[in-house]
Image: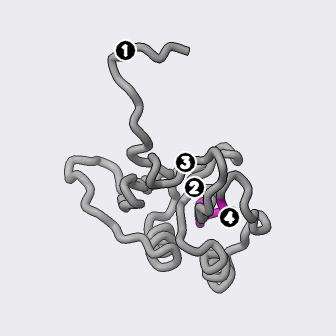
Amino acid sequence: MTHGKRAFQGRGIMHVSLVVSDLRRSRAFYESILGLIPIKRPADLSFPGVWYFLGPQELHLIEARDTNINPLQHVAIEVTDVRAAKAALQAHKIQCVSELKAGAGGFHSIYCYDPDGNRLELCQPIGFGGVASRSDR
């Protein structure tokens, strides 16, 4: 691995795009249940979709017919209270696909699927030796 001068360097995740089959249904999930607020998209895009800010990153939902995905692929969304997130999912009859993982890797987390089968990890950082906190990044 080379650590010398590079022409460019990755600085972090700018956005994650998820393919969804029904944009209206997905908007209801991401906005009403997860509380995300849509942001303006460039007007020159030729496909339907919606964008959201998630902290300094963005989540882009793109409507398309083929939503075939790898089952291990997931998007991790940081939440302030993972237990409250789990309760909100259950209140909306959204099944969690894992038990609450307490403290693994410096996070409390729970996994679920959005309406199109995109796997989501809702995680609450708790700190752990060797894992950088948000303020250290």
Instruction: Describe the element under mark 4 as helix, strand or loop.
Output: strand
Q: Is residue 79 magenta?
A: no
Residue at the bottom extreme, as displayed: 91
Whether residues under marks 1 and 2 lie with C-beta atoms below 8 angstroms apart, the answer is no
Specify which label sits upstream in the sequence, 3 or 2.
Answer: 2
Whether residues under marks 3 and 2 lie with C-beta atoms below 8 angstroms apart, the answer is no
Dot label at residue 76: 2
Q: Nearer the viewer, mark 3 or mark 2?
A: 3
* Residue corresponding to mark 4: 108
For residue 68, say whether it is visible. Answer: no
Specify which label sits upstream in the sequence, 4 or 3.
Answer: 4
How many residues crowd mark 3 within 10 Å: few (<14), some (14–19), many (20+)?
few
Q: Is residue 114 magenta?
A: yes
- Determine whether 12 is above or below 83 in the image: above
| Kind of residue indicated by mark 2 | Ala
| Kind of residue indicated by mark 4 | His
| Colouring scheme applied when the structure was drawn | one colour
Where does the image place residue 18, in percent across and percent down from the top left?
A: 50, 51
Task: Kindly report the distance in space between the C-alpha atoms of the residues bearing marks 3 and 1.
Answer: 24 Å
Whether residues under marks 4 and 3 lie with C-beta atoms below 8 angstroms apart, the answer is no
Instruction: Describe the element under mark 2 as helix, strand or loop.
Output: strand
Specify which label sits upstream in the sequence, 1 or 4.
Answer: 1
Task: Kindly report the distance in space between the C-alpha atoms of the residues bearing marks 3 and 2.
Answer: 16 Å
| Kind of residue indicated by mark 1 | Lys
Specify which label sits upstream in the sequence, 3 or 1.
Answer: 1
* Residue corresponding to mark 1: 5
